[in-house]
Image (cartoon, rainbow, N blue to C red):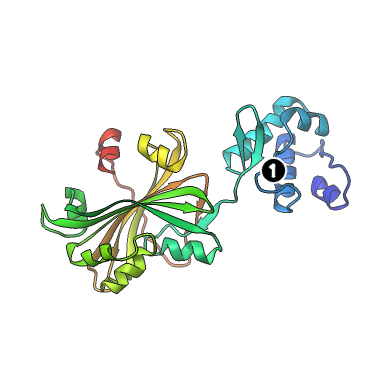
Amino acid sequence: MATRASRARGRRPQLERASPIPLYIQIEEEIRGSIDSGQIGELARVPSEIDLAAQFQVSRMTARKALDRLVGDGILFRRAGKGTFVAHPKIAHGPSQKVSFSAAMRSLGLRLTTSVLDSGVQRAPSHIARALELAAGSNVVFLRRLRTVAGEPAAIHTSYLPPQFSSVLEGDLTGSLTQLMIRAGARVAEAKDTIEAVAAAGDEAELLGVRAGTPLILIEGVAYSSTGQPLRYTSALYRGGRFRFTVDTSRPAQISVEALHESASEAAGSR
């Protein structure tokens, strides 16, 4: 594309006006290239739509559309009255609850801190008891934590374990739950998870530093031992703008669509 070639030569980028590629996409690609190359750094302010319109000799509407697309993709973010800025890079993470979040963040070289919001032993909600194959009214180990990545709230993890693993509560709950479970004799071999988009409720929004109603990614599932024993039920809420989830398609996967019978309010209440 001519814009990338001209950038590589250090000359002012020019749009290919005879190209079938819309001008706003060419501008979008130019900005993406500048971010990818490090020419525009993380959290740096990008040119305004007025500046872009003048630079590329296009209408403000065309320039705005390019910025809107980048904001929609989470590449940029806006601050009212201040401008448009480069967002933190999205964190690539596998969606399976089998993967230790702590280990995944360490492998990416990201600083992770964990705050324990609540923990203890409580009576299992009915859907948790069913998922863990416990009798109705059974107790479960309960743990709710806020995960902060690179100094920014990133996820809320809520986990339930069968009562025989209550010894995990005696360990360091700000560390890896997976490691605490191993010490308690619960080694995860596989997990079955579901992924959906939800809107941030009031307390969730406050904890994650977003507005109520902001889209979040919800991953819920059960982790099992090698013998098929349910070991953990986890409900994990992630800031959609901070994570990009990858799915391994190298092996056949079962995909199913389930009818959702609960209302939105019932679903929110179950979380």
Camera sees residue 164: yes
Left or right for 110, reference 120: right
205 and 236: which is toward the camera: 205
The residue that disc 1 covers is 44
The x, y position of residue 269, in whole percent, is 26, 38
Could you tell me which secondary element the residue under label 1 belongs to?
loop
Is 154 placed above or below 231 here?
above
Q: Residue at x 34, y 60 (%)?
A: 173
Residue 67 in percent (x, y) is at 66, 35
**The C terminus: image quadrant:** top left
Residue at the location (64% across, 27% down)?
Answer: 81
Point out residue 202 in the picture as x, y percentages from the top left corner.
37, 34
Circle 1: is it few (<14), some (14-19), or many (20+) Cα within 10 Å?
some
Which residue does the image show at 79% across and 39% down from the upper left?
19
Q: Residue 260 appears in which quarter of the rendering?
A: top left
Image-quadrant location for residue 162: bottom left
The residue depicted at 26 percent of the width and 62 percent of the height is 169
Query: Which is nearer the eye, 55 or 117?
Result: 117
Question: Can see residue 21?
Answer: no
